[in-house]
Image (cartoon, grey):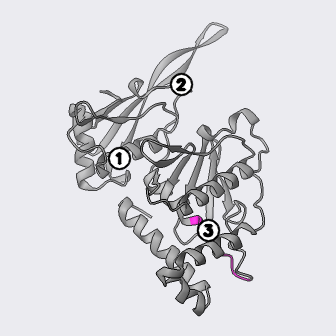
Amino acid sequence: MGKTNPETLVAEINAVAKQRVLTQDSLSDLRTFTNPRKKEATIKKLEEQEAKAPAGKTFDRRGIPDNEITWKNITMILTDLSSFKVKVKVGSRRARTVTMEDLGFRDNRTKNALMPDMKWPLLWQLATTNSITLPDTGDNTLEKRMNVIRQRLKAFFGLDTDPIVFDHDTRKYRPVLAMVIGDIIPPVIEVPQGTLWEEIGIGLSEDGLSLLIDVPSQERKTYGNESTTAPGTRRTDRPLEGLALTKAQEMMLITFVDNGIVKADSDDKNALWIRTVLEKLIPGAEGEPVSYSFEDGQWRREFGSL
């Protein structure tokens, strides 16, 4: 997929979702869906039809200890907008491919073709922007759909806790598991459990084209016949061009690295996307890589510098 701006991708997702509805429904449904007075009734009808869809399958746990299958340790990789397959990784284990039908997202109104239902694009939006805002309009359509997505993911992975949480202060839904778009974020960087962002150092390469990243590690040392582990540091690098950043976002990230502070609004899209990219790059780190201070009216880095 290459370098993709998140806003452009979300617009494309919505367009594909709309086209799916228009091409699958009958002409009468099309007219109803585009009629504002009947839109609510149409959506309710579609929701009722989708609620009758067959349940999805369950995740193949063979070879994976139960204590490793947690939301914090799961990554869902959506590879292509037109593909209805998802790669699932548990920790650093090899990814396994599942289909939207396995996850329970097949539209049961299509008899012969395999097409996803109207909740499928929401997974893409979560993977692209790392959050979805609940409008303060009194319309509970999004709330219902997010609850269904929660139940489907819980049933597929066999977990009781919620994979998507809702922040009442910001009115945003955020995934607990890592959800990424394939090829937007390079291979994730593993860190020991409990690692904080302040323990991670980020700097720039001499040519200014890559991030240098130092993360804590456990180094094995051998003394005679005895072997022990000791805290250490592991350095890796990631090219800036592979992080799905616009030029403006690259400059802002460099400012975070160099100065630690960026003056921008709390809802600045560039700062929010940088936070999302870093969270997806090092999903095991606790806390936030950059945070907003309402007292100072500015963003600041939480990671260390090199």
The local secondary structure at tag 2 comes to: loop
How far apart are labels 1 and 3 at the CA level?
A: 28 Å
Q: Give the range drawn in magenta.
A: 112-120
- Which amino acid does the dot numbered 1 rest on? Leu
Image spot of residue 295 (x, y percent):
25, 30
Per the image, the residue denoted by label 1 is 272
Regarding residue 209, the answer to whether it shows in the image is yes
> Which marked residue is nearer to the observer: mark 1 or mark 2?
1
Majority secondary structure of the magenta segment?
Answer: loop
- Give the total of numbered labels: 3
Per the image, the residue denoted by label 2 is 194
Regarding residue 184, the answer to whether it shows in the image is no
- Residue occupying image coordinates x 22% and y 47%: 251
Quadrant where the N terminus lies? Answer: bottom left
Residue 168, above or below 224: below
Residue 42, above or below 95: below
Binning the other alpha carbons within 10 Å of mark 1 as few (below 14), some (14 to 19) or many (20 upward) gives some
Mark with earlier residue (1, 2):
2
Residue 102 versus residue 15: which sits nearer the camera? 15
Image spot of residue 39 (x, y percent):
53, 78
Residue 205 versus residue 179: which sits nearer the camera? 179
Residue 159, above or below 38: above
- Which amino acid does the dot numbered 3 rest on? Phe
